[in-house]
Image (cartoon, helix red, strand yellow):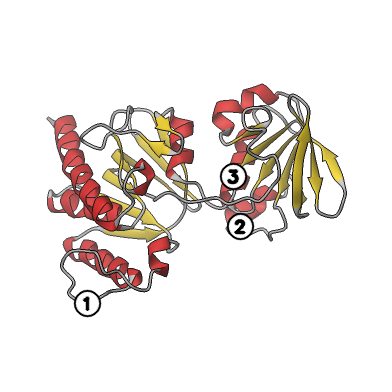
Amino acid sequence: MYDVIIIGKGPAGISASLYTIRANLKTLIIGKNDSALAKTEKIENYYGFAEPISGQFLLSQGEKQALRLGGEIIEDEVIKIKKSDYFEITTTSNTFQSKAVLMATGLKQKKLNIENLKEFEGRGVSYCSTCDGFFYNDLKVGVLGYKDYAIHEAVELEAYTKDITIFTNGAQLELSEKFLEESGRYKINNRSIASLEGTEFLEKINFMDGTSEALDGVFVAYDSASSADFARKLGVITDKNAIMTDSRMMTNIDGLFAAGDCTGGFKQISTAVGQGAIAGKSMVEYVRGMIG
């Protein structure tokens, strides 16, 4: 059992960890090396550096700082957050428990050039199996994705229907050993998607090769799960894809915090670091309050 689990090892997540670790809270940071910041060659507007630095340098220094203080960092992908008495965090390889959780995965832009995708949102296109799976009892559905998160969503949908196809949109499956085995239960369609079609609701999916397939619903689980994806499943209040928090960076769910780009607003490193610091201090107070 951890006191705090931080999802994301960018500026917001690492900044928060510096406060929780120094407060002697058992802290686990889970993240992947896929930050957009790592691709930034020159950062000239961050306090304390007279000369430009790279995003990769800043990220590596942050991780070293957290590790020096006694934090634990693992490279893995979180695919599920569940709340009961405590939080249960499921990754592609393990499950962890904690008293408080910080979502700090940034704001991933999932660019899918599929005609009518947005037009059918809420009318056959969903981003949350937990929220909308019930409406597809015994119907034919697809999951749009090619990584572990897509297979996880398919597993969740089995509670409602067995007619499930994974649509990779031309990508090759990139699955861990655990989910590679799970994927054998589903039909896999690797064709590139041109458009979605229907009248009032989604009726079929059209492919670039001119073929089509009848379909009642599509669940988008492209790439990896973002903070917004977790928020939808947990019932966190959002404004579009931005997670709403109070002044302590806590969401409407007790013990669940968010910081950085996933909260919307001014998307700058300094903003993420500041929000992370507030979240870190707030999590210390929250966990100590539980103990008290």
Name the element at disc 2: loop
The residue labelled by disc 3 is: 221
The Cα atoms of the two marked residues, 3 and 1, are separated by 40 Å
Local packing at callout 1 (Cα closer than 10 Å; few below 14, some 14-19, many 20+) is few
Residue at 66% x, 58% y: name it. Answer: 173
The answer to which image quadrant residue 253 occupies is top left
Q: Amino acid at mark 3?
A: Ala
Q: Amino acid at mark 2?
A: Leu
Which of marks 2 and 3 precedes in the sequence?
Answer: 2
Name the element at disc 3: loop
The residue labelled by disc 1 is: 51
Q: Amino acid at mark 1?
A: Glu
Residue 222 visible somewhere in the drawing: yes
Dividing the image into 4 quarters, which one contains the C terminus? Answer: top left
Q: Position of residue 29 (x, y in %)?
A: 32, 54
Viewer-proximal residue among 33 and 260: 260
Residue 185 visible somewhere in the drawing: no
The Cα atoms of the two marked residues, 2 and 1, are separated by 41 Å
Name the element at disc 1: loop
Local packing at callout 3 (Cα closer than 10 Å; few below 14, some 14-19, many 20+) is many
Image height of 253 relative to 44, above or below: above
Local packing at callout 2 (Cα closer than 10 Å; few below 14, some 14-19, many 20+) is some
Instruction: Between label 2 and label 1, give the one nearer the viewer.
Output: 1
Residue at 59% x, 49% y: name it. Answer: 222
Q: Position of residue 101 (x, y in %)?
A: 31, 41
Residue that extends furthest to the bottom in the rendered view of this protein:
51
